[in-house]
Image (cartoon, helix red, strand yellow):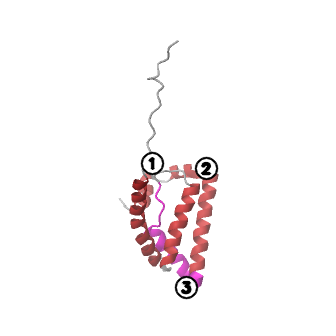
Amino acid sequence: MSTDQGQFAATPVTAPRRSRDLLAGLSIAGLLLPEAVAYSSIAALPPQAGVIALFAGLLCYGLFGTSRFAIVSATSSSAAVLAAATLSLSDGDAQLRLSLGFALVLLTGAFFILAGLFRLGGVTAFIAKCGFRSTVTGRFG
């Protein structure tokens, strides 16, 4: 009774390359941190709010996210909408604007989690592809 070990030979497992992961993490941080500070200024919020939102978003996506290709970051359009919504309701009170922004972001996140739990991702099939792509990429046309 002979068995062919070549067919069932184990493939060697390589050690994880932590240095590459560290370099990738630092590269992404180098891009996202200044972006978060800039977008928080567009939203008329303090810079630390952008940094905290960045880390909170990355942490939440690490816990709940399922796509390897999704980009978890603020956008200039979302910062402008947040500024418009909070400035119109706060009457110049910076603390109220910060609280309103925090509540709006939490409410939006809760809606996203509910949409994921109810598997509502198929709703995007009803959005025209050119409109969806232009909203995602920021390019119109």
Disc ID at residue 16:
1
The amino acid beneath tag 3 is Ala
Q: Position of residue 36 (x, y in %)?
A: 45, 71
Q: Are marks 3 and 1 in contact (CB under 8 Å)?
A: no
Residue that numbered label 3 is attached to: 94
Q: Residue at x 45, y 56 (%)?
A: 132
Q: Residue at x 60, y 53 (%)?
A: 116
Cα separation, mark 3 vs mark 2, equals: 37 Å
Cα separation, mark 3 vs mark 1, equals: 46 Å
Q: Secondary structure at mark 3?
A: helix
What count of labels does the image hold?
A: 3
Residue that numbered label 2 is attached to: 119
Cα separation, mark 2 vs mark 1, equals: 34 Å
Q: Position of residue 129 (x, y in %)?
A: 44, 52
Crowding around mark 2 (Cα neighbors within 10 Å: few <14, some 14 to 19, many 20+) is: few
11 to the left or right of 66: left
Q: Secondary structure at mark 1?
A: loop
Closer to the camera in the image, 27 or 141: 27
